[in-house]
Amino acid sequence: MEINSLGDKLRALRIAHSYKQIDIAAVIGVVRQTYSHYERGTRTPNVDTLYRLAAFYNISVNDLLKYTTQLDPELYFDTPMPQDSDTSDNDEFIKFLNVPFNKKRFRFFSNTERRLLFYFEQLSTIEQWELVEISKLKTTKEDYKSKK
């Protein structure tokens, strides 16, 4: 697909990640119809929305606006994959990320790290401590395996 406009780029990114328009709209805080207008080129997202889109796809706004970049769906993109059926879990996660404090706090984290922290913060202090200890054991076990 040749990318000639911002709308083409947004559509190509969405398709490369197997998202629906409603998924992206929820993340950036607009209704699906507005996002559809962005993809069709009948509306242009404001600067704040461009930053949200770029952050969601883990690319710079500069890269988002470069129309010449070709997208290869076979390449790895560090964005969260849509869940098959558990939409309530995704809804909570999206609400969590849309809180202004969390947006700033997790801006430079990968989406995997964001999801991990989302669930980590829902655990009790004791469960968090146990998880840290399990992670330490798992890491040292992996280090031990790699030295063999």
Image: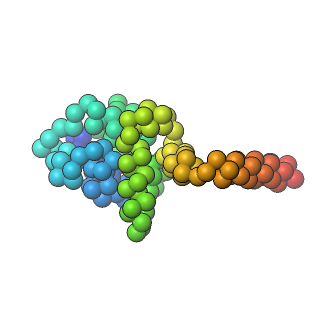
In screen coordinates, is 146 left or right of 104?
right
In screen coordinates, is 65 left or right of 117?
left
Q: Quadrant of residue 17?
A: bottom left
Residue most extreme to the left: 42
Q: Name the spot of residue 95 as percent of width and height, x first.
A: 37, 48
Residue most extreme to the right: 148
Q: Is residue 141 above or below residue 68?
A: below
Residue 132 is at least partly visible in this image: yes
Residue most extreme to the bottom: 85
Q: Name the spot of residue 47 as percent of width and height, x first.
A: 26, 30
Instruction: Tell which of 15 and 26 is nearer to you.
Output: 26
Instruction: Tell which of 56 and 101 is nearer to you.
Output: 101
Q: Name the spot of residue 31 as percent of width and height, x first.
A: 21, 50
In screen coordinates, is 124 left or right of 8?
right
Looking at the rendered structure, the number of numbered marks drawn on it comes to 0
Q: Name the spot of residue 115 as percent of width and height, x first.
A: 51, 50
Q: Residue at x 59, y 52 (%)?
A: 123
Instruction: Tell which of 71 and 29 is nearer to you.
Output: 29
Q: Residue at x 27, y 50 (%)?
A: 25
